Amino acid sequence: MSRWSREQIAARVARDIPEGAYVNLGIGLPTKVANYLPRDREILLHSENGLLGMGPAPTAGKEDWELINAGKQPVTLLAGGCYFHHADSFAMMRGGHIDICVLGAYQVSTRGDLANWHTGEPGAIPAVGGAMDLAIGAKQTFVMMELLTKRGESKLVEACSYPLTGVRCVSRVYTDLAVFEVGVSGAKVIELIDGLDISALSNLTGHNLCEQG
Amino acid sequence: MDKSMTSAAEAVADVKDGASIMLGGFGTAGMPDQLIDALIAQNVGDLVVINNNAGNGEKGLAALIKAGRVRKIICSFPRQIDSHHFDAAYHAGTIELELVPQGNLAARIEAAGAGLGAIFTPAGYGTLLADGKETREIDGRSYVLEYPIHADFALIKAHRGDRWGNLVYRKTARNFGPIMAMAAKTTIAQVSEIVPLGGLDPEVVVTPGIFVQRVVAIPQTSGVRA
């Protein structure tokens, strides 16, 4: 079975980000989305540690370690970008000013619950960072993930078994096999990769899926 | 009024065992390394530290944890590739961890500085980190009751300051500095340079001097890797 690569998922997410959007890309997989944002759209990237208008990584030797992103890697600031303190930064999220937040996930429920911060493994040091604030704050929360675990279990689930990050906060899930809308009325398929049909997808995920329409 | 100090050691001289201390910084950006070095040198311990992380590498908060001075840490993201000194203390059971979602950490610090008794925040609702906490539905949205985080001291790093304590910051090293300055009883800022009164454009002062009790100049090259 063919599937989208992580790069292709990132490109697919980027296509849905409109001109003028304020966007936060979570650490990990979602940062790839920045590479595919259409050049003809002005989209401003927010970073939780206090910048809006984040630009690409600096060239080697030009790093400024006081200009970093949420993953603590050096970045640049676009002309017109700005800095602010942490309370303002999270007010931008919590207050619903950020249009779209893109996050990775361990699991998403068909109703839009998100689990992405903790596997619940005994002995693991728990770390949450901005995940809970991001999940519930933006106008729309998108998730990017591979649909199945390595063992073939669906990560789109009826109810998350991992500890929750947020309740009913995800609106869209972009995966290597399909794109879903999730929410109170359950999961609907927006798009399937070539060669996969809805009944095969229903079998893979264990959900009785239908296409949006 | 002159809040300038001659040295980091003088600036932190009255920090006692058991103090609660906010440390500015997101990772190493904004971490007041030289103030922390002075704390380590004067041998205080049993500290409760509030920071976003739990130390990176060998300097700053990482060095304070390595030296065994931190009893408890309140933070959002302690698990990092270079947080080995925290990892060791955590697994040895010698450090207590209170995990707080990052935005709630900021809001609770800000609430302390603003004199609020508590806040209702939507972040964390329905999760393990809200277990046992009071919740309320307001206008159809669910919130968790969270209390302010106060501290005896805030140690922060800014870019430039004056003798009245006005501060401007540099790039993303600003992060928690302005709100921690508001929340602590005594705020100590290390700056690259203390400028004469009037040397900071009043339109761009980020932290008004009323929130800062001590300023110490520690000249350094900006933006180099800590």
Image (cartoon, coloured by chain):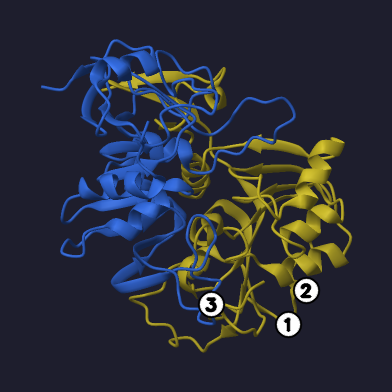
Q: Earlier in the sequence, mark 1 or mark 3?
A: 1
Q: Which mark is residue B159?
A: 3
- From this viewpoint, is residue B82 visible? yes
Circle 1 crowding by C-alpha within 10 Å: few under 14, some 14–19, many from 20: few
Circle 2 crowding by C-alpha within 10 Å: few under 14, some 14–19, many from 20: few
Give me the residue at 34% from left, 60% from top.
A35
Chain where mark 2 sits? B
- From this viewpoint, is residue B13 visible? no
**B154 vs A47, nearest the viewer:** A47
Q: Is residue B25 above or below residue A4?
A: below
Give me the residue at 27% from left, 41% from top.
A96
Q: Which residue is mark 1?
A: B6
Circle 3 crowding by C-alpha within 10 Å: few under 14, some 14–19, many from 20: many
SS category of the residue bearing label 2 = helix
Q: Which residue is mark 2?
A: B10
x, y (%) of residue B15?
Answer: 78, 58
Which colour represents chain B? yellow
Chain where mark 3 sits? B
Q: Is residue A116 above or below residue A21?
A: above
Give me the residue at 48% from left, 43% from top.
A130
Q: Amino acid at mark 3?
A: His
Q: Is residue A193 above or below residue B73?
A: above
User: CB atoms at circles 2 and 1 under 8 Å apart?
Assistant: yes
Q: Is residue A53 left or right of residue B38?
A: left
Q: CA distance from mark 3 to mark 2?
A: 20 Å
Q: Is residue A171 left or right of residue B185?
A: left
The residue mark sitting in front, 1 or 3, is: 3
Query: Which quadrant: the N terminus of chain A?
Result: top left
